[in-house]
Image: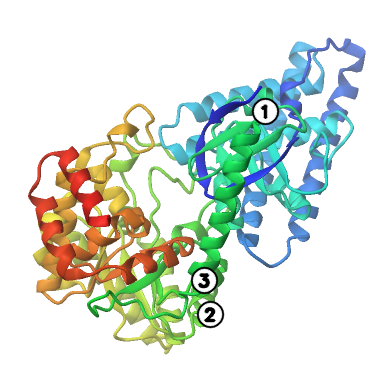
Amino acid sequence: MSFALHGVGVSGGIAIGHACLVSHAALEVTYRLVPPERIDGEMLRLDAAFAAVRDELDAMHASIAEGPASAEYGAFLDLHRMILDDPTLSTAAGAHIAQHGCNAEWAVAQQMNVLIAQFEQVEDPYLRERKADVTQVVERVLKALLGHPGHVSVASRRDGDNILVAHDLSPADVIQYRRHRFSAFLTDLGGSTSHTAIIARSLNIPSIVALHHARSLIRDGDLLIVDGTQGVVIIAPDSRALAEYRLRQERLELEKQKLKRLKTTATVTLDGTAVELHANIELPQDVEQARESGAAGIGLFRSEFLFLDRADLPDEDEQFEAYRKVVRKMRGLPVTIRTFDLGADKNLDSSRRVAANPALGLRAIRLSLAEPQMFQVQLRAILRASQHGPIRILIPMLSSAAEIAQTLHQIERAKDGLRHERIPFDEDIEVGGMIEVPAAALCLEVFMRRLDFLSIGTNDLIQYTLAIDRADDSVAHLYDAMHPAVLRLVAHTIRSANRAKVPVTVCGELAGDVSFTRLLLGFGLRIFSMYPAQLLAVKREVLRSDLPGIVPLARKILRSDDPEKIRTLLQRLNG
């Protein structure tokens, strides 16, 4: 019988293939009473299992090959090694064996539940999802105890397209499975910020997470249709559904091939207006995709990904090499590096207290100014890299003139240090600010007087304007990019910057959404920045657009307070 499951699509596209189920040892552990005379032996079994997994992770780390997502894999393995070495897990499991006289498997599983309960109390979605990493590490320890370390069993494997179905999937598992060329990933757990999601996007294969019951409802060998764009899995599809999705798959592939022809086409509207399309990246390896898409530059390098999931902070030389690598690979095209957007929601030190409302706490530029030594290390690295190509500095979450003044002071301090050491850098490096807080959008004059360019981060601007935590499922339906207040703030920022002749970019999700391309053009936007995979589709929309016909409708949309009318007008605009 055919049925469908719905989850969170984290990487778009359509895959059709057979299910390959991954076993989940943590769900299969049973309790066994251990006699007192055998407790020492059980403790030795526990130590041997931890040692085996430690060797396994080290071997995986050593075998990582250069290529897409290699840095992500290394960072994930480092995090798993940290969890494995944490005495809260290993020592507490040993104490559980001694106190309760139980088998090592049961003790490890119980301690895993304790740690997961602690992560459940964390409000930030990114940190909360790190509980999945605890589960993945424990999974490996349990497999070692059960006699098959280094093996995450797939129930079967066939020739042709295979779709991996797992309760959860660790980055280390993905390293093992890459050689099998799976066409899609499905997991019960995870979210849009989970490690599985990050890897899926980097590998550019259809993937859906948060399916909840896929692992228990899907049988090995079931024929599946995975629609990563819609977040839908169809199990045992009938011939009609299969024919329809195969046709969609062929059309998507044909569209991809057609879009590739636009790579070298000038990005100009029908009336001759030039538009720049830049790429958002998270790690140096993403530059290859940016270049393949024909990006006019890097509009947003999210530098915080260099800081996450590691035991130590990247030092100045490591950051410098990462920034230099990006600017050299872009071969003279501009690179905009956003200083780290870390904070109470993404603590570098897990012992720090997590704020009650992390999105409103010590994050982004607030944290940078509160930790000047860490900020100086990054600023010096960026400035040093500016000697090797055109780099701009972008500051996240600015909200006041005081923050701008303090930030510029820190940049000047970093410059003075380099001058004193006779280290070359671009003396005229441009500094810009993110407009993602309503206060910034409403006080643009001071921003435009002190900064060289602006970049609108629509994701946070929507969140803060509507007072909605976009990570909270209970209010996610209220997160609305077409809310009149949001549209007016975006339009106001673009128009004000244009009047002042200050370059302005939109680098949030709206920039890569083709349904908003014409509206943003109508607001006066001429620089977009998005994920490389979205760039050619947006370029096609720009090439089809005629500004004289767009501007009047865009103004009409801004005057409307009725969400339904706005949607109707937007459909007309895109028709």
Disc sitting over residue 418 in the figure: none
The answer to whether 558 appears left or right of 297 in the picture is left
Q: Amino acid at mark 3?
A: Lys
Residue 285 image position (x, y, % from top left): 57, 67
> CA gap, disc 3 to disc 2?
20 Å
Disc sitting over residue 215 in the figure: 1
Q: Amino acid at mark 1?
A: Arg
Residue at label 3?
A: 260
The answer to whether 167 appears left or right of 532 in the picture is right
Rendering quarter of residue 561: top left
Regarding residue 464, the answer to whether it shows in the image is yes
Residue located at (31% from left, 86% from top) = 427
Looking at the image, tell me whether mark 3 or mark 1 is earlier in sequence order.
1
Query: 490 or 472: nearer the eye?
Result: 490
Query: 332 or 98: nearer the eye?
Result: 332
Q: Report the quarter where the N terminus lies.
A: top right
Tell me how many marks there are: 3
Looking at the image, tell me whether mark 1 or mark 2 is earlier in sequence order.
1
Residue located at (84% from left, 34% from top) = 144
Rendering quarter of residue 333: bottom left
Of badges 1 and 2, the one in the foreground is 1
> CA gap, disc 3 to disc 1?
37 Å
Residue at label 2?
A: 329
